[in-house]
């Protein structure tokens, strides 16, 4: 693929084991940074109560998903908890070229694929305060059957082994702090030398190279 960070926006991946509170954190971050764009994934899993098609996910059939793979529509895709999840390539390239920072909420397998395809990627891993607290949160959420909870905990253990591949680690102990940390890294990345060079060029009305 063409490198997605070729435009002036920054591509972000945010991963976390199921139950860490990533969706809640990202919702707050997106509310406070209206220029950010969130990539709505396609999935074969059923909607959970309260989830809105097109806002949380595009819910599609296995056949449609496989057709999407064949047509090369996905920047990355993975099988997670026995369901398929994939990121549409087209909107991401459009947003990045328009200068928006883009967030992908994807799992560790997807992050690996995007890291390989987009060297400018920045990644955030959100950790629970402890594994015991993650277990409590997942059981308390009550959205999965007990065998699903056990399966998600097994996956979480393996995902936690990948934290060292990520650029930033944020612990979701207190929600407000985790949101502030997430906003801090996104804002700090906008101030790096590389991205400032673009702003400096615009400031001095210099020609782009
Ligand atoms: P959930 O079913 O709880 O919404 O999501 C399960 C996992 O799938 C989460 O770790 C979430 O980040 C991941 N996920 C959601 N969308 C995508 C996607 O498009 N690609 C990949 N690789 N993972 C995704």
Image (tube, rainbow, N blue to C red):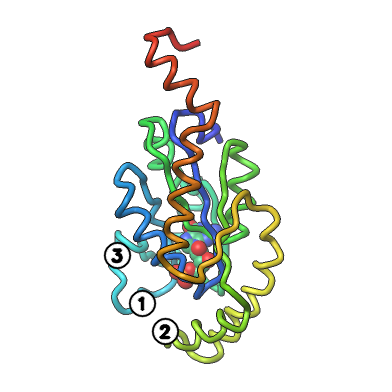
Q: Tell whether label 2 touches label 3 (CB within 8 Å).
A: no
Q: Tell whether label 3 touches label 1 (CB within 8 Å).
A: no
Q: Quadrant of residue 117?
A: top right
Q: Residues within 10 Å of mark 1 (few under 14, many from 20)?
A: few
At 48% from the left edge and 55% from the top edge, which residue is drawn? 181
Of marks 2 and 1, which one's residue comes earlier in the chain? 1
* 204 w.r.t. 173: above or below: above
Q: Quadrant of residue 116?
A: top right
Tell me the CA gap for discs 3 and 2: 17 Å
At 58% from the left edge and 73% from the top edge, which residue is drawn? 129
Q: Secondary structure at mark 3?
A: loop
Residue 48 circle label: 1
Q: Residues within 10 Å of mark 3 (few under 14, many from 20)?
A: few
Asked whether mark 3 and ligand 1 are closer than 8 Å, the reply comes as no
Left/right of residue 62 with respect to residue 114 in the rendered view: left
Per the image, the residue denoted by label 3 is 53
Q: Tell whether label 1 touches label 2 (CB within 8 Å).
A: yes
Disc number lying in front (3 or 2): 2
Tell me the CA gap for discs 2 and 1: 7 Å
Residue 143 circle label: 2
Left/right of residue 120 with respect to residue 99 in the rendered view: right
Tell me the CA gap for discs 1 and 3: 10 Å
Q: Secondary structure at mark 2?
A: loop
Query: Along the line of sight, which residue is nearer the eye, 23 or 73?
Result: 23
Q: Residues within 10 Å of mark 2 (few under 14, many from 20)?
A: few
Residue 207, how many percent across, how many down? 43, 8
């Amino acid at each position: 693929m063409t490198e997605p960070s070729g435009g002036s926006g920054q591509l972000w991946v945010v991963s976390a084991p199921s139950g860490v509170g990533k969706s809640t954190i990202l919702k707050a971050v997106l509310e406070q940074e209206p220029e950010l764009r969130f990539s709505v994934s396609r999935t074969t899993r059923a909607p959970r109560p309260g989830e809105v098609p097109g806002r949380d996910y595009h819910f599609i059939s296995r056949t449609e998903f496989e057709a999407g793979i064949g047509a090369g529509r996905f920047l990355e895709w993975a099988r997670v908890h026995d369901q398929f999840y994939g990121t549409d390539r087209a909107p991401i390239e459009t947003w990045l070229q328009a200068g928006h920072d883009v967030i992908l909420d994807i799992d560790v397998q997807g992050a690996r694929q995007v890291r390989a395809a987009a060297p400018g990627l920045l990644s955030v891993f959100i950790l629970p305060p402890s594994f015991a607290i993650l277990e409590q949160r997942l059981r308390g959420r009550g959205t999965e059957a007990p065998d699903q909870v056990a399966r998600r905990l097994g996956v979480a253990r393996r995902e936690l082994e990948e934290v060292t591949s990520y650029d930033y680690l944020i612990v979701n102990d207190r929600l407000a702090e985790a949101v502030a940390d997430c906003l801090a890294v996104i804002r700090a990345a906008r101030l790096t030398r590389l991205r400032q060079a673009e702003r400096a060029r615009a400031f001095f009305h210099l020609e782009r190279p």
